Amino acid sequence: MHSRQRVMARKWIRILSWSAVVLVLLVTALLVHLYLEGRPAQGRPQYVAMGSSFAAGPAISEAAADSPWFCARSRDNYAQQLARLRGLSLVDVSCGGATSRHLLDGGQWMQPAQIAAVTPDTELVTITIGGNDIAYIGQLMARACGDSTPWLQRRLGGCKLRSVAQMQQGLVGLQQQLLAVIAELRRRAPQARIVLLTYQSVLPESGSCERLALGTAQADEMRGIASQLAETTRAAAAQGGASVMDASRLTQGHDACADEPWMNGMYPAGGLLGAPLHPTIEGMTAIAQALDRLLNADTP
């Protein structure tokens, strides 16, 4: 009897050992895939686009050919459209979920810092960043949580609220990070034009609406945060000597509640994969055209 138990024990040990080996190989293959998938394109980019999902443009059209799945870059985000308008070679390293830290200190999922794509030949850099530093969209989504909120979203912390004080404290660190990014860009590409973009308008100038799933008081609170986020970007650009594309002002009147919205509401078609509270292709096109005008105005 004991001999049979020893045989069975050895059998299970072999099964568990081989299972562990297979698991290690699968995890290693996944990590290698993630590492290789997100390598920025090689070459001498005239234009480097950096930033978070408001630059990447998730779910507005087909994915960009070089986009890692976790970045959700669209082939029609404002950078891609601007590059086509001006005939620029582009390396787009924008990525959904990015914070200002990912620009300088290493990207998500084993990726290099976004700024690594910049070369001495780079002529233009655009940056939309900061919302994830203070969980701006995350807070809007958490405020909208209710009985119909999917269980998975709750389990993943999608309904976790932050205090206004926490978000304001994050803005202090954001301005310093933006200044550090500008300084490093100057070192890497001394001749490059640097343009910081504020976030597009999500909320109407007053009140709220069903598409936002927010009460008026909640919308008022978040309007204040959105205003401070935009002002932080403007202040960093002014202090660092960069240009500003004020997307928040440009898109006023085309918020999620507008008759002609350039912003998705809380519950777009496609659910979470439809990019709630993120720009539509119309908004991205408006930004690309405004950037084109801005650059033309400064061309001798």
Image: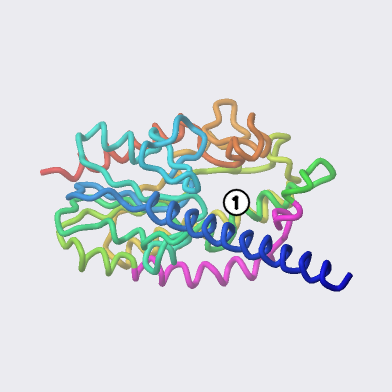
Find disc 1 in the rendering and name its residue: 137
Total marks placed: 1
Judging depth in this view, the residue of 20 and 155 nearest the camera is 20
Task: Tell me: 123 left or right of 272.
Answer: left
User: Image quadrant for the N terminus?
Assistant: bottom right
- The quadrant the C terminus occupies is top left
- Looking at the picture, tell me which residue is in the foreground, 195 or 25: 25
**Is 180 placed above or below 256 here?**
below
* Image coordinates for residue 268, horizontal then vertical, percent: 64, 32
| Residue drawn at point x = 64 percent, y = 70 percent | 165
Characterize the local packing of mark 1: few (<14), some (14-19) or many (20 or more) Cα atoms within 10 angstroms: some
Is residue 267 depicted above or below 229 in this figure? above
Q: Residue at x 54, y 69 (%)?
A: 170
Residue, x 39% and y 32% (percent of image)? Answer: 285
Q: Position of residue 191 (x, y in %)?
A: 15, 58
Instruction: Give the magenta range.
Output: 154-180
Residue 246: percent from left, percent from top: 40, 47
| Image x and y of residue 232, in percent | 45, 62
Q: Is residue 132 magenta?
A: no
User: Which residue is at the far right?
Assistant: 1
Check disc 1 and give the amino acid type.
Ile
Per the image, label 1 sits on a secondary structure element best described as: helix
* Residue 248 visible to the viewer: no
Q: Is residue 162 magenta?
A: yes
Q: Main secondary structure of the magenta part?
A: helix
